[in-house]
């Protein structure tokens, strides 16, 4: 039996805050709400904003919060695209549970998206390309301890987050950005030796080179659909969902230099 059948899903991003109701299998039960993320939004401001935006959504049993940073036991430790100093040590899980009167679980946003995307076989790596760069790591369907791989140094003063994040994409232009993304995928293959790579996030559809073998694009909606599987493991329902379908752009050839 499912632990909870109606879950309120939050997907916190550097530019947008999204919310929706999903069922125990990750199917949407409501419209998807979105508001802009305030610049350097403080924790208490975030709680008030999230609480206000979901007033139209009713009848949920539990809450999942996907957060763009390192979180542990319901507490935020880093929030690179929101302002880590203000967020460090903030118990967002408890704050949202109190504000909305329902049990809540706080997870890294890439972890949540990965729970919806993975097939559950072998070593699977999920990456998100958005305001920053996120990763989630799974072994035979089991989520592994979260690693902030985004902050591993990759080039001179840059970590992955700064090297292929949205700020750099705008600064260096599309052609150089996709070249860096391709190089990042090559590094990930060597480091993780994954069986399948899933690529999500707001900038995933900007990729216009041929994806590596055993790689596919996943929809942004997985960032909220995965909220269901934080509470209800997919194995409860038997056969796991297969990899997300690649978009038409993922099959396009790499542009000539």
Image (tube, rainbow, N blue to C red):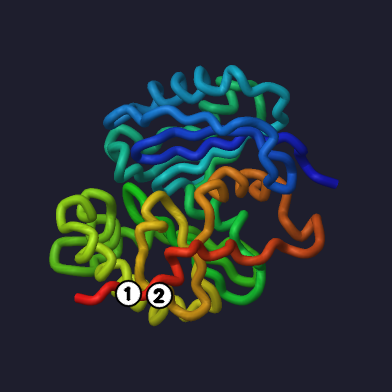
Most foreground residue, 157 or 246: 246
Q: Position of residue 1 (x, y in %)?
A: 85, 47
Most foreground residue, 227 or 206: 206
Residue at (35, 78) in percent of width and height: 186
Q: Dot 1 lies on which element?
A: loop
Asked if residue 67 is positioned above or below residue 155 in the image, the reply reads above
Crowding at mark 2 (Cα within 10 Å: few <14, some 14-19, many 20+):
some
| Residue 93 appears in view | yes
Q: Position of residue 127 (x, y in %)?
A: 44, 61
Q: Position of residue 19 (x, y in %)?
A: 54, 33
Residue behind mark 2: 210
Tell which circle, 1 or 2, labels the residue nearer the N-terminal end. 2
Q: Quadrant of the C terminus?
A: bottom left
Name the side, left or right, on which 149 lies relative to 109: left
| Residue 159 appears in view | no
Name the side, left or right, on which 83 lies relative to 68: left
Residue behind mark 1: 254
Q: Position of residue 64 (x, y in %)?
A: 59, 39
Crowding at mark 1 (Cα within 10 Å: few <14, some 14-19, many 20+):
some
Most foreground residue, 70 or 210: 210
Give the CA separation, mark 1 to mark 2. 6 Å
Q: Which label number is shown at residue 231?
A: none
């Amino acid at each position: 039996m499912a632990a909870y059948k109606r879950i309120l899903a939050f997907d916190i991003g550097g530019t947008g805050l999204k919310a929706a109701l999903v069922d125990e299998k990750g199917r949407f039960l409501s419209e998807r709400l979105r508001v802009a993320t305030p610049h350097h939004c403080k924790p208490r401001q975030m709680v008030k904003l999230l609480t206000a935006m979901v007033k139209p959504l009713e009848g949920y049993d539990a809450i999942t919060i996907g957060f763009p940073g390192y979180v542990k036991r319901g507490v935020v430790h880093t929030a690179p695209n929101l302002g880590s100093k203000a967020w460090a040590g903030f118990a967002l899980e408890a704050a949202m549970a109190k504000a909305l009167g329902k049990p809540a679980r706080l997870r890294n946003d890439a972890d949540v998206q990965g729970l919806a995307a993975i097939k559950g076989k072998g070593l699977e790596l999920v990456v998100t390309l958005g305001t920053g760069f996120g990763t989630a790591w799974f072994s035979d369907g089991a989520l592994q301890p979260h690693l902030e791989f985004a902050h591993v140094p990759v080039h001179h003063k840059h970590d992955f987050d700064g090297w292929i994040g949205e700020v750099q994409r705008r600064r260096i232009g599309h052609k150089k950005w996709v070249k860096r993304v391709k190089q990042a995928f090559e590094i990930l293959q060597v480091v993780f030796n994954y069986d399948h790579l899933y690529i999500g996030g707001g900038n995933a559809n900007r990729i216009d080179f041929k994806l590596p073998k055993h790689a596919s694009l996943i929809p942004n909606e997985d960032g909220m659909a995965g909220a269901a599987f934080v509470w209800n493991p997919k194995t409860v329902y038997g056969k796991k969902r297969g990899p997300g379908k690649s978009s038409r752009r993922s099959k396009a050839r790499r542009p000539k230099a």
